[in-house]
Image (spheres, rainbow, N blue to C red):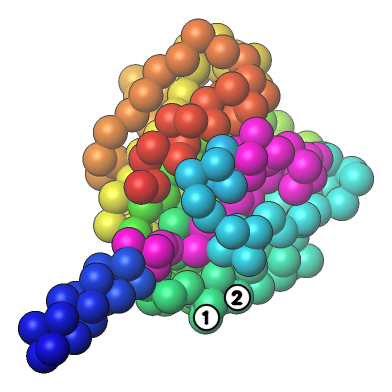
Amino acid sequence: MKIIQILLLIMVTVTASAACRDAVVLVHGNGGSSSDWNNTYAELLNRGYSGSEIYRPNWGSACVACNNHSGTEEVPVRNAILDAYASSCSGHVDVIGHSMGVSLAIKQIIALGLENDVNDFVGIAGAVRGLKSCGYYPYNVWTSTCGYWGLSVGSPFLNSIYNKSFAHQVYSIKSWNDQIVCYGGCTVGGIHSSSIWSETASYNYYLGHFGLQTDTAIKQVDLIQ
């Protein structure tokens, strides 16, 4: 009888452990919305995640050129990461960002001091090294998106997060055909702007800026499991 009880306890423990996953935060890009993640959300559900384990904050105003990485844009993303962390049964979170959502999420993780609590970070079509279309700070920087807190090459904001640790495993998904990141040139200092420092791996696709988000859902979820 005692042996049966022990076996049952082991089975329950293994089952509970298998069901315990990191909560996931999906951060859309500038001018986007949470629905941009519909394919990824569906794939997560297909893999056994529940809706309560997935956080999709909406951030930013309708004025795309007005959005940057400081102020009201930060609040929804910061709160989503905090809520995911508080509710995660594993005590860790995974974060997937697209476009400006990549750099915005990185800033929040560092600011919250959760670098050791993010297991996997997937940056899709980010511009963590800057956008050549935004210019080189501080010259010819005309919009907030490209300014001090924006994505101009060499901006104080980008310099403030560069080379900082913010997750245990970091992956980038990028394209040499990205019409946003590659406008004016894909590389900064000879490195693709979507490549993240100290990344675990990087994956190239023959897709555009938005296809990288919608058409790589399977790979995205593979990387956080």
Q: What residue did someone put label 2 on?
A: 83
Task: Give the quadrant of the N terminus.
Answer: bottom left
Between 96 and 100, the one lying in front of the other is 96
Q: Measured from the top left, where is residue 183 in percent x and y?
A: 62, 16
* Rendered image: mark on residue 86: 1
- For the magenta stretch, what is the residue range? 18-42
In the depicted structure, whether residue 99 falls above or below residue 91: above
* Rendered image: mark on residue 33: none
Magenta highlight on residue 21? yes
| Residue drawn at point x = 55 percent, y = 41 percent | 46
Label 1 sits on what residue type?
Answer: Ala
The number of callouts visible is: 2
> Horizontal placement of 7 versus 158: left or right?
left
> Horizontal placement of 21 versus 80: left or right?
left
**Are discs 2 and 1 less than 8 Å apart at CB?**
yes
Q: Is residue 148 visible?
A: no
> Horizontal placement of 144 versus 98: left or right?
right
Q: Measured from the top left, where is residue 122 in percent x and y?
A: 44, 43
Farthest residue in the bottom direction?
A: 2
Determine whether the residue tagged by mark 2 lies in a helix, strand or loop.
helix
Q: Measured from the top left, where is residue 37 in percent x and y?
A: 67, 40
Determine whether the residue tagged by mark 1 lies in a helix, strand or loop.
helix
Magenta highlight on residue 9? no
Farthest residue in the front direction?
A: 1
Tell me the quarter of the picture where residue 18 sits: bottom left
Tell me the quarter of the picture where residue 140 sits: top right
